[in-house]
């Protein structure tokens, strides 16, 4: 559970840093995401989640 909470904290740090350092680029990125069809967003999310699970599996073994 501690590893999970650390991972969430790291996500918050990285995302916060991106918004703080590149606010205009993040605004454009969000606008681009909002213009995409729901199915495309869902597929990208599933691919990202599978990639994350695979990376955790590789790093923990």
Image (spheres, helix red, strand yellow):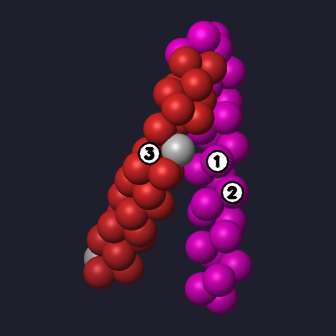
Q: Residues within 10 Å of mark 3 (few under 14, many from 20)?
A: few
Is-magenta flag for residue 58?
A: yes
| Residue assigned mark 1 | 48
In this view, the residue in front, 18 or 8, is: 18
Task: Report whether residue 23 is seen.
Answer: yes
Q: Residues within 10 Å of mark 2 (few under 14, many from 20)?
A: few
Label 1 element class: helix
Q: Residues within 10 Å of mark 1 (few under 14, many from 20)?
A: few
Tell me the residue at 61%/60% (across/down). 52
The segment highlighted magenta reads 34-61
Which callout, 1 or 3, points to the residue nearer the camera?
Answer: 3
Label 2 element class: helix
Q: Is residue 1 left or right of residue 46?
A: left
Is-magenta flag for residue 56?
A: yes
Q: Earlier in the sequence, mark 1 or mark 3?
A: 3
Q: Quadrant of the N terminus?
A: bottom left
Q: Tell me the tag on residue 51.
A: 2
Tell me the residue at 62%/20% (across/down). 32
Which callout, 3 or 2, points to the residue nearer the camera?
Answer: 3
Q: Quadrant of the C terminus?
A: bottom right
Q: Tell me the tag on residue 19.
A: 3
Tell me the residue at 59%/29% (across/down). 29
Percent coordinates x, y for residue 51 in the rendering: 69, 57
Task: Report whether residue 33 is seen.
Answer: no
Q: Earlier in the sequence, mark 3 or mark 2?
A: 3
């Amino acid at each position: 559970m501690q590893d999970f909470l650390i991972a969430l904290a790291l996500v918050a740090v990285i995302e916060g840093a991106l918004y703080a350092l590149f606010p205009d680029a993040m605004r454009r990125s969000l606008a681009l995401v909002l213009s995409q069809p729901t199915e495309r967003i869902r597929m990208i999310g599933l691919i990202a989640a599978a990639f994350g699970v695979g990376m955790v599996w590789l790093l923990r073994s």
